[in-house]
Image (spheres, rainbow, N blue to C red):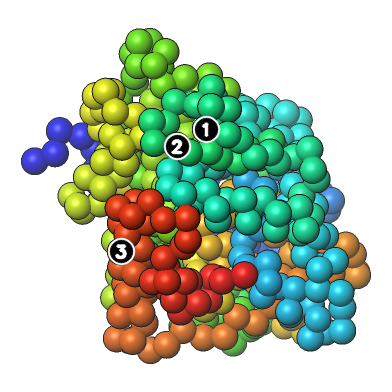
Amino acid sequence: MHDFVNGSISHWMTQASAASAPDHPNRHASLPDEEQALVIVGGGLTGLWTAYYAITQHPEWKITVLEAEQVGYGGSGRNGGWLSTLIPGNRAVYARAAERQGRDGAAAVRAFQREMSGAIDETLRVAEVEGIEADQHRGGQLQAATTPAALKRLRGTYAANLRNGYAEDSIELLSADELQQRINIAPALGGMYYRDTVRVDPAKLTLGLASAVEAKGVQIFERAAVNSIRPGTVVASRGVVRARTVLSCVEAYTSEIESEAPGFGSRQLIPVNSSMIVTAPLSDADWERIGWNGLECLNDGAHTFVYAQRTADGRIAIGGRGTPYAYNSGTPGLGAVDDATIQTLKDRLDYFFPGTRFSIDHAWRGAIGVTRDWCAGIFFDPETRIGTARGYAGHGLTATNLAARTLLDRVSGEWTDLTALPWNDHESGTWEPEPIRWTGVHTMYRLFGVADRWEEARHSEDTSLIARFGSRLAGLHE
């Protein structure tokens, strides 16, 4: 029996629900009989951002959001809380895709990077305008290298970032001393600082955005799982809704919906699990020893990397892959985490911050949508008027805002800077059938785990050949 909460969606959702009245009777009313201008499938951040910009641009539209469980149930309410600049996918893959269309691949990727960075500013702007308090703090991001090989990779990433659209003043290489002045990670050999990343409480952001769109006249219906999408028609568990335009924004759950529109299909995307734990609040003495006064988002340079934040109430929330994939694309339900993964994440805290005693308050996991080439895709068919966004591969908190605005530009039929980005109509291929798919994903993560142990034991400056093989197997190599 655990002495902490395991599952229950997430710590973020539990805390947010406890702090506000969770009862929304309108979300359980009968579905609308009249045709809607826009039906959005999915009550996470992609769907809510889409609803927000749609109703802001077209206040006369009748807009309905259909959510299978409750607002924030999926990845939007479970993630690590980073508004990150990182593109959702492999830059080299996007560049090659643009080049196949006769475009400058490097320029396309740089444009994508600028829009991703701009989406952080846009998210903060809307939060301020709508009065959404999500513990947002622009402290940047620290990537810590704890092995010589990770430090060498980090320097390569720094150079690649500058080639691919990062401004010189937005990233900085740090020595071991410079990193430890910000956060005292005992084994760190150096790091990289990303200036623009913002820490948030993702549940507060998601629930606040839901309230904002409802105040503008959007209808949200919960416990309304969508089974299929056809031109002009959405079939849900609670009835059928007619719509001129339908946009699917369910990310890791895309394969659960039947549709012949582009972007759908049982093997185009799989749900990959990412797990998190959050500690009890740390003492002032602990924080004095650790530092972290800048409230930066934190990750490391390992192949089986972790990501973390110092929360507004003085905890550490840390996540990583753990058990990455359930057979036949199973989704995590309420998010209970196995004991081995919980221990792995706690061990990482102990490794980073020896001498600090950590107790766990909550553990949970969620699913991220991953395509075969780990790149996201935005699709819209002007004939059927069905669209979808999927495949953020763990970089969705910022990407959801950009995806929503891109989807609506696609709906308008206009050629814009956003519709020119290389994730539009990006075909990623299909995943292998089971059991090859399960075996491949688990093999990849085992290879990365072996490579991390090899690099930590040998202190080599060169990335393990095992990791290089795993990266190419997965399609992650740039």
Q: Please tell me how crowded label 1 is: few (under 14), some (14-19), or many (20+) other residues with Cα within 10 Å.
A: some
* Three-letter code for the amino acid on which mark 1 is drawn: Ala
Q: Is residue 243 visible?
A: no
**Which residue in the protein does label 2 denote?**
188
**Are dots 1 and 2 in contact, CB under 8 Å?**
yes
Image position, residue 305 (x, y; %): 43, 52
- Left or right of 460: which side holds 33? right
Secondary structure at badge 1 equals helix
**Are dots 3 and 2 in contact, CB under 8 Å?**
no
**Which residue in the protein does label 3 denote?**
450
* Three-letter code for the amino acid on which mark 2 is drawn: Ala
**Are dots 3 and 1 in contact, CB under 8 Å?**
no
Image position, residue 466 (x, y; %): 38, 71
Q: Residue furthest right?
A: 415
**Quadrant in the picture for residue 143:** top right
Disc 1 to disc 2, C-alpha distance: 6 Å
**Residue that appears at 53% across and 27% down:** 177
- Left or right of 441: which side holds 471? right
Q: Which of marks 3 and 2 is nearer the N terminus?
A: 2
**Which residue in the protein does label 1 denote?**
176
Q: Please tell me how crowded label 3 is: few (under 14), some (14-19), or many (20+) other residues with Cα within 10 Å.
A: some
Front disc: 3 or 1: 1
Image position, residue 391 (x, y; %): 56, 67
Disc 3 to disc 2, C-alpha distance: 20 Å
Q: Which of marks 1 and 2 is nearer the N terminus?
A: 1
- Left or right of 329: which side holds 300? right
